Image: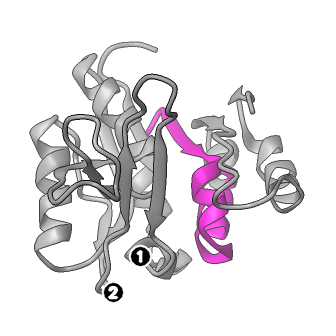
Amino acid sequence: MNKKEKIITFGEIMLRLSTPDHQTINQTHSYIANYGGGEANVAVSLSHMGHNCYFMSKLPPNQLGDGAISHLKSHGVNTDYVVRGSTTLGIYFIETGFGGRPSKVIYNRKHSAITRAQLEEFDFDEIFGDATWFHVSGISLALNERVAKVAVAAAKYCSEHGVKVSFDFNYRSKLWTVEEARPWFKEIMPYCDVVFASF
């Protein structure tokens, strides 16, 4: 990539609630709050490398949505392509592993704002008109059919308009099965230039 490429990432940014001091979720009475998500983290990382990064998503028009936008902006990520609607921000709880105990994640994201996203809410001509890269992952495809259709349509548009597409399988067994993932992966793959395919 050249410096100052316009890079679009699409996905869900969530509120991350982590237990302090290696406590389990059952033990803790407080959490450390942060914002994060696969595609949002890519935008943040590339922004710190000097690229012109935009995050494309849907967030609720409340303080939680505002907090997620503030987080992205604090890392230099442009949020002009985040639409607002619905009422819920996805949340995940995490307890960090300790010794022989593995880390544990619990998702609460089934009815989050992005799961209400509609294709017509995103103007691809505006979003991708001068873009050079588009990045999305299998997590977005796993959320529900509406989100998957937006992701695949965006990848198809980019492929047809000379915008490079990168796709990370980023398979999450807590979200769907391999059998459920397979047809969506097959649908998006023809439009991808770079694929990260580990399971």
Asked whether the viewer can see residue 92, the reply is yes
The quarter holding residue 9 reads top left
Q: Which residue corresponds to mark 2?
A: 86
Residue 112 is tagged as 1
Q: Is residue 51 left or right of residue 192?
A: left
Residue 135 is tagged as none
- Asked whether disc 2 touches disc 1, contact meaning CB atoms under 8 Å apart, the reply is yes
84 to 196, vertically: above or below: below
Foreground tag (2 vs 1): 1
The quarter holding residue 43 reads top left
Q: Earlier in the sequence, mark 2 or mark 1?
A: 2
Q: Amino acid at mark 1?
A: Ser
Residue at the image position 38 percent from the left and 58 percent from the top: 92
Q: Is residue 112 left or right of residue 73?
A: right
Foreground pick, 146 / 97: 97
Residue at the image position 14 percent from the left and 45 percent from the top: 73
Assign the C terminus to one quadrant of the image: top right
Q: Residues within 10 Å of mark 1 (few under 14, many from 20)?
A: many
Q: Is residue 182 left or right of residue 6?
A: right
Indicate the position of residue 93 as horizontal and vertical percent values.
Answer: 36, 56
Q: How is the image coloured?
A: one colour
| Alpha carbon separation for disc pair 2 and 1 | 8 Å
- Which stretch appears magenta? 130-156
Indicate the position of residue 129 as horizontal and vertical percent values.
Answer: 44, 49
Asked whether the viewer can see residue 130, the reply is no
